[in-house]
Amino acid sequence: MTFKLKTLVAAAALAFSAAGPAQAQVSGNVVKIGVLNDQSGTYADLAGPGSTIAAKMAVEDFKAKEKGLTVEVISADHQNKADVGSQIARKWYDSDGVDVIVDVPTSSVALAVSDVTKEKGKAFLVSGAAASDLTGPKCSPNTIHWTYDTWALANGTGSAIVKTGGDTWFFITADYAFGHALERDTEAVVIKNGGKVLGKVRHPFPSTDFSSFLLQAQASKAKIIGLANAGADTTNAIKQAAEFGIVKGGQNLAGLLVFLTDVHALGLDKAQGLIFTETFYWDLNDQTRAWSKRFAAANGGKYPSMVQAGVYSAVLHYLKAVAALKSDDGTKVIAKMKEMPTDDPLFGKGSVRADGRKIHNAYLVEVKKPSESKGPYDYYKIRATIPADQAFRPMADGGCPLVK
Amino acid sequence: MDFFGKPLSYILSQLVIGLINGSFYALLSLGLAVIFGLLNIINFTHGAQYMMGAFVAYFLLNKLGLGYWWALLIAPVTVGIVGMVIERLMLSRLYKLDHLYGLLLTFGLALIIQGVFRQEFGSTGLPYNAIPESLQGAIDVGFMTLPKYRGAWVIGASLAICLGTWYVIERTKLGAYLRAATENPTLVQAFGVNVPRMITLTYGFGVGLAALAGVFAAPIYQVGPLMGADLIIVVFAVVVIGGMGSIMGSILTGFGLGVIEGLTKVYYPEASNTVIFIVMAIVLMIRPQGLFGQR
């Protein structure tokens, strides 16, 4: 049997580069919104095509046409790779006439796109990415961090857990910008509240098998195993923890970033009792319910994550600023957005700070028991509302050069 | 007692975990080796077929109420039949061409299958919580808490299947036909063996192995459209390291690399996704035909 080794090596290389950068369309003389996120990988359900739907709903609700604005929404897949993301951003800004990029989960990609946006003087509205550095040392006059960040998650979830006795921690951390930021911010909260961090392990992103990391966490004897990761990484880790008898052995898991879509994927019997922080839940009030039902109808029955809700809210505010300014100059629009108070059906009234941080309430939620849930997506009990002025890192602590 | 700065019991438990992951690598690379051996096709749909096995298990449970044991039987057969249809309709036209054509076809098919599943079920995956009673829970084996399902069942079953397959191909008359047909199909056909049918069945068997691995994986990982895509690259590296022609090579390499990966997770976890490719690069430099391959 003859076999060409080169062919097989080429095969492996082919698989690595599974899909090339997605295409983008050509721009006319319009306000062009580019939704850039993971459309096919581990974060595709919590952001992905659903975020594009949310952006389109915002354009629709803004009634752009009646106000004499032509608005167009396009989207692309950054595959969670910073090089792919910044390449698309450059192309969008340089040749496709895109005025604003929204969403961009995966912090490493968001940080790269933020740099490109600043260089080109455009606008960047982050909903999906979490790293608090976006309004800290890496803040930019062209970027607003909309929905949530690692500090808010750490502050909400971390302090609630330490205060109820979970004072020794072991981190299982995704090995990239987001995981590092979430681990760092949570560690600070744990220590501030009198807790201790016994150890940490960093896993490649994405991973499927967490058994080795879970055993290391088990050996540490920490009371709390903090999962500083997201999406499929978190669901796999939670699922596998049950197998190794981690919760039975007296240790508890803290999912530091869990989305509605993750709970749906895990099922309530595996997810029940998890406590974490969200800034949006569809079942908060009549307005959020009405909007979410509309969204679900357009999104194949899947309810919105906070990331998708954030995209809607951010695009709506952006369009208000563009209309008020009668210009889509990125730097000016971002400045205008910071000046105007925010108000929308999903996050209520709020504001955007000088460092680019959008401020609104956060919620500490607990996942219901299967017996408490009335059906699909009836998953959370709201344990506490963290008021807007306490939910996010004080501006002075962030180290953002814009506000010094 | 310490072992390079880590307690021995701890290293032992990580070795067991490595063997468990290795058993998935072994099962999958075995199927690839069998298919390549006989069809000369680099089966890039293998990951998608593994994923389909897990999905069939999910549907059996949620639509028909059939549990894990049924899935072990039905999923490989169903996916195997789908594979045989693909072989008859498409792959059989490519045998005389360069490997690259088969690779492109199967790669394209894999993307299509994954795309359809992602469109339909989302990327986060679905829960499959159907470990049979007898395999639930964990046993304390002294140095670790070993989940029964993974520790006893998955390792044991895949080892048995791997060795069984090796035995059939290397030590029985049927295996002799298969190997002979690989060397010289025309001659074997002249002896009255229906080679095309044998090839179709072999492909179905290789695909069935992938689906079986998918059923093994369903209760531990999320049943998701991308579960195979994540794994297939590693499995291809395993096959390259082991040497493409060798059945035993792919089995041993599968388990061996699982262990190497496991140890990397202890000493330098950040590199655990890369270590297999580093090994691959080294093997290719020193022994390009693979550890067990023949020139």
Image (cartoon, coloured by chain):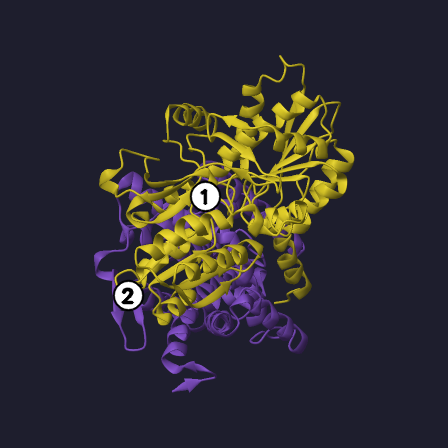
Chain colours: A yellow, B purple
Outermost residue toward the top in this view: A66
Kind of residue sitting beneath label 1: Gln
Residue B100 visible somewhere in the drawing? yes
Label disc, if present, on residue A260 of the rendered structure: none
Would you say A103 lies left or right of B261 here? right
Would you say A9 lies left or right of A210 here? right
Q: Quadrant of the C terminus of chain B?
A: bottom right
Q: Nearer the viewer, residue A175 or B141?
A: A175
Kind of residue sitting beneath label 2: Lys
Q: Nearer the viewer, residue A214 or B190?
A: A214
- Residue B207 lies, with reference to residue B156, above or below; the image says above
Q: In x, y percent, where is residue A199?
A: 44, 69
Disc 2: which residue: B148
- Residue B24 lies, with reference to residue B111, above or below; the image says below
- Neighbours of disc 1 within 10 Å: few (<14), some (14-19), many (20+): some
Q: Residue at x 45, y 61 (%)?
A: A172
Q: Nearer the viewer, residue B290 or B269?
A: B269
Q: Secondary structure at mark 2?
A: helix
Q: Residue at x 71, y 31 (%)?
A: A332
- Check if mark 1 and mark 2 are on a common chain: no
Label disc, if present, on residue A390 of the rendered structure: 1
- Neighbours of disc 2 within 10 Å: few (<14), some (14-19), many (20+): some
Q: In x, y percent, where is residue A28?
A: 75, 24
**Chain on which label 1 sits:** A
Q: Nearer the viewer, residue A82 or A343?
A: A343
**Chain on which label 2 sits:** B
Q: In x, y percent, where is residue B41?
A: 58, 56
Outermost residue toward the right in this view: A95
Q: Secondary structure at mark 1?
A: helix
